[in-house]
Amino acid sequence: MAVNRVDLTEDAAALLRRLAADHGPLMFHQSGGCCDGSAPMCYPAGEFRTGGSDVHLGDLDVAGVPSPVAVWMSAAQFEYWKHTHLTIDVVPGRGSGFSLEAPEGVRFLIRSRLLTDDELTELDDN
């Protein structure tokens, strides 16, 4: 099984299906700033401009969402998280005003675990 850096819970997938139905293709970006900037922000694909200061963590294939959901993180934030596997989840609460889930009364968040030595080796080889 291929190692990836990012995944999502079924609750997050269900929310992405609803958001994609309303907004079309989606993407995530986590800036690592303070407050809401430290949470994964969901945008219509391409609405948040990424560049050389961002790391593409992977694409999430979500059943019922027509196109993969790209996940990006600022390079500075990635330096802190590069040894972890990230899982995007959703919890009750107020999200950021810029993230698409904000009006839903929930917010996306990151859960993490350390990557194993074998996982890190496989990621380094790719």
Image (tube, grey):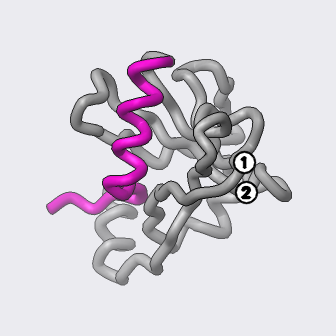
Dot 2 corresponds to which residue? 38
Q: Is residue 18 magenta?
A: yes
Residue 21: image x %, image y %? 39, 20
**Could you tell me which residue is drawn at 29 percent across and 38 percent down?**
62
Magenta-colored span: 1-22
- Tell me: residue 81, above or below residue 55: below
- Bin the neighbour count of mark 2 within 10 Å (Cα to Cα): few under 14, some 14-19, many 20 and up: some
21 or 69: nearer the viewer: 21
**Could you tell me which residue is drawn at 65 percent across and 34 percent down?**
103
Asked whether, in this view, residue 116 is left or right of residue 103, the answer is left
Residue 106: image x %, image y %? 59, 49
Distance between mark 1 and mark 2 Cα atoms: 6 Å
Dot 1 corresponds to which residue? 31
**Could you tell me which residue is drawn at 64 percent across and 20 percent down?**
47
Q: Is residue 50 magenta?
A: no
Amino acid type, label 1: Ser
Q: Earlier in the sequence, mark 1 or mark 2?
A: 1
- Tell me: residue 7, above or below residue 83: above
Residue 7: image x %, image y %? 37, 55
Contact, mark 1 vs mark 2 (Cβ under 8 Å): yes
Residue 72: image x %, image y %? 56, 42
- Bin the neighbour count of mark 1 within 10 Å (Cα to Cα): few under 14, some 14-19, many 20 and up: many
